[in-house]
Image (cartoon, coloured by chain):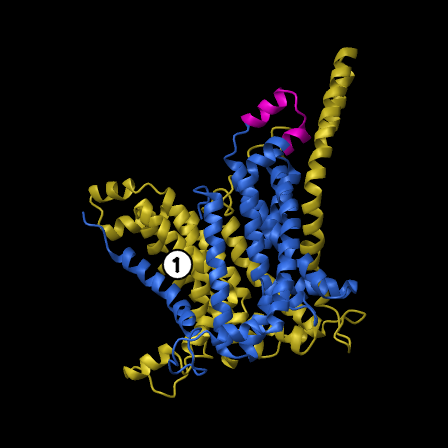
Chain colours: A yellow, B blue
Amino acid sequence: MGGRGTHGQTHDRHGDADRNRKSTAVRAAAQRKRVHEWLMTLPSLVWLAALFLVPTLFVFAIAFKPADLFGGIGAGWTLETWRSLGNPNYPSIIWRTVLLSVVTTLVCLLLAIPTGYCLARAKPRWRRLLLLLVVVPFWTNFLVRVFAWKHLLHPEGLIKKTLVASGLLAPDTSLLYTPEAVLLVMVYTCLPFAILPIYAAAEKFDFGLLDAAMDLGARRGRAFRSVFLPGIRRGVLTAVLMVFIPSLGSYVIADVVGGPNSEMIGNKIAQRTFNDRNLPHASALAALLTLVVLAPMLIVLFGPGRNGTATGRPTPRPDAEGPVP
Amino acid sequence: MKRSRLPLYTTLAVLLFFYLPIAVLVINSFNGSRFEGGWGGFSWRWYERLWHERDIWHAFGNSLLVAVTATVAATAIGTLAAIAMHRYQSRLQRLHYSLIYAPLVVPEILMGMSLLLLFVALGVNLGLGTIILAHVTFCISFVTLVVLARLQDFDYSIVEASLDLGANWWVTTWRVLIPMLAPGILAGGLLAFTLSIDDFVVTFFVAGPGATTLPIQVYSMIKHGSTPLINALSTLLLVATFALVTAAQWLTGESIKT
């Protein structure tokens, strides 16, 4: 943007008085436009810089601070916190977090792709109803949905009783407080986030292409794999992002339906914050989680074979006002 | 060629998966028996008990206060941001867009943790005030994107017509742009309200000891409280959600796609 002013000046030197006046008017208009732009941009820019960007970076700084005795942040700098992360518990917790998130994402895709396909091909009247049925759980309170499963998996709950009665399960097996229960509830809470973007992409897909592929001799599975899936690639990528990243940071689910052997990074952050009140330690874990989250995001945003962004917004058109660096 | 029935069966299975736990919970909220095992006959007793729980109503009041304040602030800031992003295509707006988009892809726990650190470092007293600040922060992005989506298929010739006919930018904005954007702004506000009233993770981090919102109350009931009471409360929340979603569909008509 800085280049525009100098542009105008070189122009002025060659021009006569009339052109000079015109140029001043143009420049004043441009100036006014810039002021307007800044006035409209500043509220959100300042708010998010102060309450999102700065605190996020702050986490990294606090991780190098010592804790004080009152649950606050001490003076000076230390590497002590990072050394304590070498604790043999952590690698397994991080591994479990990543593994649970990967499996959750895969299961969600496996269920969401056929569902999105079905929704997109349904007759309009049915589609509206199905969509509403998918959207309602999406809007339902998260804690209620987690609690519903705790209720269902409970030793006295419906599922346990049915399984024991049909002889599939020994009466002393616990369904709750296991990593499998955590996985199940993670899939349950994340699935609408996978279905909606995939449906949105499938809705725009031209299903005539599938018929064409099959007319040309492709079998049904082949047409689905080689024509439909590439066609909804954007939706699938958005779904991956919408499921995988929140999964990495989830802790309520493991807290409510998980046991001691299903803890995730999020649980450790909450423990260090609320139970031990060791904020630097919690910050170091949060910083670690940020790095784990950034990796898939960068791959999706800048990875190979991408055009445009994963945001669903068209790439900004070339700047009409000046050269883009 | 016959279409595969597999997608249909998957969809039906998914819907069963979605609604089975909810249905069991709703049915059990009318269970007269205190114990999960048996059916003790149809009863409203848990709802009556709920009516007399002062803590829940207090928490609900707090939640409403937070949600209304956060929604109004986030809707104003977010709408302005969306208009700015749509009207100007500059490097500043690209930066702006990244900053708006980033909170959406950051796990909630990180946002809660970092805000807690900020408030602790600044010596701010934790309470309803910090909850509101936090809620506005995560609502801005959602409002902006919803309004921006609405602007994307906005017919700009109407704005140009207004300018050509002599209205200045402010008049045009207030009397043409905002009224035409109203459905988008309303949808964004509704989304912000729902997100705020539902939020647990971020709220839990920045709440401090005194301030309790409804989700925090629900969480402590899940951890320590009586199950039938939570069933009843959950059912009420479900009914409220259903009403809100239906209202949203009705308000935005066919225009809302996802």
Q: Is residue A26 above or below residue A199?
A: above
Question: In screen coordinates, is B254 left or right of A282?
Answer: left
Residue nearest the viewer, comparing B216 with A3:
B216
Q: Residue at left 24%, top 42%?
A: A211
Q: Does residue B159 show up magenta in the picture? A: yes
Q: Residue furthest bottom?
A: A172
User: What secondary structure is marked by label 1?
Assistant: helix
Q: Amino acid at mark 1?
A: Leu
Query: Chain ID for label 1?
Result: A
- Residue extent of the magenta highlight: B157-174
Query: Relative to B229, is A114 on the left or the right?
Result: left
- x and y percentages locating residue A90 in the rendered image: 57, 75
In the rendered image, the residue lying farthest to the left is B1
Q: Which residue is denoted by mark 1 in the rendering? A: A109
Q: Quadrant of the N terminus of chain A?
A: top right
- Depicted B31 relative to depicted A195: above or below: below
Q: Is residue A195 above or below residue B149?
A: below
Q: Residue at x 34, y 81 (%)?
A: A161
